[in-house]
Amino acid sequence: MEKKTAVVSKDANVEAKGSSGGSLFATIVIPVAILACFLIYIFVLGNGANFEGGDNENHPLPGNYLGIVYKGGYVVPILMSLVLLVLIFSIERTLTISKAKGTKSVAGFVRLISLKLNQRDVNGAIAACDTQKGSVANVVKSGLLKYKEMQNDTELLKAEKVAAIQKEIEESTSLELPMLEKNLVIISTIASISTLTGLIGTVLGMIKAFSALAASGTPDATALSNGISEALINTALGVTGSAIAIIAYNYFTSKIDELTYSIDEAGFSIISTFAAQHETAPANSTARQQTI
């Protein structure tokens, strides 16, 4: 019992460390990305070399897209930050999910576990988990350790042993999956707000353009078209950020679903093999049933 408690405590500590690590990463990356984008907006896009007369208050030079983007206003660096964050967290999730898969093919690993169990080589299956590593291997290994423990148990009924193995796999899965899904909420949030932020920037830009036109007192088609094109920069950036975020979110969700399916497949193989190889209930268990 003490050993089991120690194992659970260790798993809880690992989960807590992973959770705090992921939260710390997001806490550091988000403000750094926003600061970097504001600096790029001011010193790169707003460089006087991009504008007529060397002053960023003037119109951008013909064909100078850096100057055109700068004229989108201070919503632009926010939209740039959203795009940058999607790219950063996509790289982070790619590395995390790749590590969770382990060193070899997940499908091949699941087949190997099934083969080892059919050969009644539980120790070989556990060794395969140690070689594979990753979240899938961790879950399967916990189920195999419980499998081995139930083999030596002479008190429980077969149904109780199967339930114990299944519960162990489910608990291990609940510890591993949150780490795979961490930071996906940030990507999904960006997918939702990026377009809206771009529209806000466009509306503010249109208001500014028409206000300047009204203040001048004379219709200026060139100035109005410039103002509208600058305002629409925000919409373009917002839609781009949202599209990238949606693609990234769906991609990572599908990859996590694949890992979950592999875990379920391996768990089913462990449970069904145990049930098939332990048809006869122990004598103690039969006496217990008769007593009940």
Image (spheres, rainbow, N blue to C red):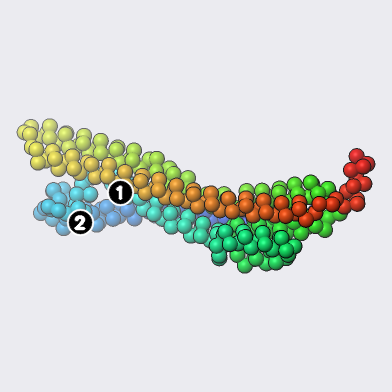
Residue at which label 2 appears: 47
Q: Nearer the viewer, residue 174 or 279?
A: 279
Number of numbered discs: 2
- Residue drawn at (47%, 57%) of the image: 94
Q: Earlier in the sequence, mark 1 or mark 2?
A: 2
Q: Position of residue 214 (x, y in %)?
A: 12, 32
The disc at residue 271 is: none
Q: Secondary structure at mark 2?
A: loop
Q: Quadrant of the C terminus?
A: top right
Q: Nearer the viewer, residue 121 or 232?
A: 121
On screen, 165 above or below 104?
above
Residue at 53 percent of width and 49 percent of height: 257
What is the crowding at mark 1: few (fewer than 14 residues within 10 Å), some, or many (at least 20)? many
Instruction: Name the spot of residue 85 as percent of width and height, x first.
Output: 39, 52
Q: Is residue 20 above or below residue 115?
A: above
Residue 77 is marked as 1
**In the image: residue 128, left or right of residue 21:** right
Query: In the image, what residue occupies the spot 13% across and 48% down?
Result: 59
Mark 1: which secondary structure? helix
Indicate left or right for 277 with 205 as reference. right
Judge left or right: residue 60 versus residue 277.
left
Q: Is residue 258 visible?
A: yes
Kindly identify the amino acid type of the residue bearing the numbered disc 2. Asn
Residue drawn at x 75%, y 62% is 120
Q: CA distance from mark 1 to mark 2?
A: 15 Å
Q: Position of residue 243 (x, y in %)?
A: 35, 46
Q: Which amino acid, mark 1? A: Pro
Q: Residue furthest left?
A: 218
